[in-house]
Image (spheres, rainbow, N blue to C red):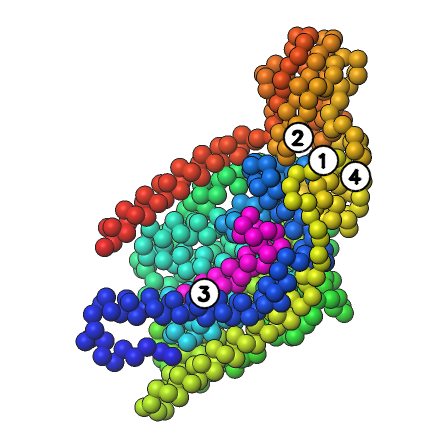
Amino acid sequence: MEPDLSSESEITLEEVRRAHRLAYWLIAVVALGFAAMALWPALRSGDLWSSRYDWRYFETMSEMARRSVLWYRELPLWNPYSCGGEVGLANPQSLDGVPTFLLVLLFGTPLGFKLSMLVYVTLGIFGMALFARKLDIGWTGSIVAGLCFGLSGYHALHLSVGHINFAGALLYPLLLYFFVRATEELRFLLWAGAIAGWIASLGGTFTPAMAGEVLLLWATMQALWPMEHEQHTGSRLRDGLRVYGLLIAVALVALCLSAYRMLPTLEFIIDHPRPPFRRTPDVTLLKQVVFDLFAYRDFGALSGRKYWSHEYTARLPQVVIPLLLTPLAVYVLRGRSALREQSKLLVRLWLLTIVSILLSLGNFSPVAPWSLLQKLPVLRDLRVPSRHLILTVLWLSILAGLGTERVMSWLTSQTSSRWPQRLLGLTLIAAAGIDGALFFAHSFEDVFSVSIPTPPGPVPFFHVQGHWSQMRDLELQGLGVMGCDEEAPLQRAEKLNLGDVPQVAFADAASGQVLRYQHTPNRRELTVELRSPGAKLLLNSNWNEHWKASPEAVAVVKERGQLGLDLSKLPIGQHQIVAYYRPWSFVIGVLVSLLSWLAALGLWRQSRQTAL
C-alpha cells in the first residue's frame, strides 16, 4: 500500500504531486464507501423520521427552519411554533447556520439529516487520514487512523441517539490539520478558522469547547516539546507566544467568518444565561475507560453508571489493540532510536492520551482536570466528563496509524516482494473499516422508522397545548405547541390563547378593529382601524426584545411576557403596521461574515499566487 519511491529521482515533482493527489482522491473514495456502509440502515430509511428523544427535537427545529426558508422565503430567525415563540438561529442548539443545512433544504429534513451524517463521517475519516499524513505516517497507517477515528463507537452512539451537533467532533482532525499547516504557512489560518467556525455554528456546548481543548493541548505540546519537522526557534517562550497567538487568531477568524450565526447566539447567551445545571459528581474508573474504548454496547442503561451507554461508549475497532502495542513495544524494547523521528510523536500522543483519559474520569479528585474545569466560566456548565473520550479516541487513532506503519516496515524488511505488504495493508484497512462500520450500522438499526404525513405548504397557524412528547408531530402539522421541550432559556408569556382563534387582538376591543392580518415566522403584517386614542394590540406570541415595528410611531411592548404593540402615537383612522423580528446582532453579523469571506477569499488567492 505504500508508494514505491525507489526511483523518485527519475520522476518530476509534478508527477509526485499528481500521484499524491490521486492517493488523496482514493482515500476520499474509501472514506465515503465505509461511511455509506456504516450509515446504510439510516440511508435506506429514506424520508422516515426517528422515534428517539433527541432526534425528535432536532428534526422539529430544523424542519421549522426549512419551512421558513422554502415556504415563506425568510431566514429562520424566529421560531413561532415552539413554546409560544422562541429564537431560531440564535438558539445555541440550532443547526441552521452550517453548510449541511443546504442538504436539509434540498432533500427534506429526514433525508437531509442522513446525508449530513454521511458528509461528517466521511470528513472524519478523510480528515484524520490527512492529519496522519501530515505527521509523516504512511498511506496505509493514515487510512487505518482515519477509519478508527471516523467509525468509532463514540460517533456511532452519539449520532444514533440524536446528538447531531456532536457531528462537529468529526471535524477535529481537519481542524488540527489546518492549524498545523498554519504554523508553517500563515495562509492556512483561514482554513483553520473556517473549520472552527463550522464546529461552533453546528451548535451545542460540548463540541466547540472540546475543539478549543484539542487545539490548546496540541499547541502546548508543540510549544514545550516541538518535533523535528515543526518550526521552532530554540526559545520556548517565543515558540509558546507564537502558537498561542495562532490559537487566538484562529478564534478571531472563526468568529468573523461565522459572525452571522455566532453574534446572535452570543447575544442570546449573554442576555439569557442558561440556569446552572445540577452539577452532581460523575466518576469513571480507569478500568471502566478500557471497557468504554473497546466494549460492544447497545443503546441503553449501564449498571452502576450515571448516564446511558451513549455517554460512555467510544468503541474502537478491535485491530487497534495490537496496533497500539506495536510501536510502544518497539520503543521500550529497542530504544528510542528504533523509531527515530517518530519517537517524539509517539511520546506526545501517549501524553495527550493520558491527559484526555484524566479529563474523562470526572470528579475523582478535587484537583482532577474535570473538577478544575468546572470552576471556569462556560466550561462549568458542561455536565458529562466522559464525553472527553473523543479526545482519547483522537490520539489513539493516530497511534494505531503509527502501529500500522511499524508493522508494514517490519514486513518490508523481511521480504523483497511488495505483495505481502500490500496484502497486509488491505487486511488492516478492511479489519478497521468493516469492524467499525458494522458497529456503526448496528447502532442505527431501527432508529428511523416513523412515517409522518406533512402538509405540502403553509396552513393556518394557531397554538395548542400539546405535550413535549407530541411536540414534533404537532409542529409538523403547522401548529404551535405550548407543551414543548427546550433546553435554551425561554422567554414565555404568562398566558397565550389556544385553539383556532385570532392571533392578534386589541387589548380593549372598543379601541379598534383588525381589518387584515398576515402571519409569517418573522413578520406580522396588519391593517387596523383605530377608533380611540391609546390603543394597544396584543399578538398571540411570546415577547422578545428584538422584535421591531413600523411605522416608527408604533412601539413594541411587553405585556406579561406577551408581544404587544403600543399604537398610542398613531392618529385615529386606518393604518398599515408591520411587526418583525430582526436582531441587530444578526444584521451586523451578516455584514461582518460577508466582508470576512470576501477578504479571506482574496487573501487565499493572493497567497496561492505568491506560493506558486
Q: Nearer the viewer, mark 1 or mark 4?
A: 1
Q: Locate the C terminus and report the quarter of the image it occupies.
A: bottom left
Mark 4 or 3 closer to N-term?
3
Residue underneath mark 3: 126
Disc 1 element: loop
Residue 360 quadrant: bottom right
Tag 4 residue: 464
Residue type at the position of mark 1: Phe
Please identify the residue farthest to the bottom as the structure is shown. Answer: 415
- 265 and 532: which is toward the camera: 532
Comparing labels 3 and 2, the label whose residue is closer to the camera: 2
Residue nearest the observer in this picture, 369 or 260: 260
Up/down of 201 relative to 33, above or below = above
In the rendered view, tell whether residue 354 sits above or below residue 98: below
Distance from Cα at disc 3 to Cα at disc 1: 45 Å
Q: Which residue is mark 1?
A: 461
Mark 4 or mark 2: whose residue is earlier in sequence: 4
| Start-end of magenta stretch | 103-130
Q: Earlier in the sequence, mark 3 or mark 1?
A: 3
Q: Residue at x 25, y 54 (%)?
A: 611
User: What residue sits 49% from the left and 63% below the top?
Assistant: 122
The answer to whether the residues at label 4 and label 2 have Cβ atoms under 8 Å apart is no
Inter-mark Cα distance, 3 to 2: 45 Å
**Mark 2 in CB contact with mark 1 (< 8 angstroms):** yes
The residue wearing badge 2 is 519
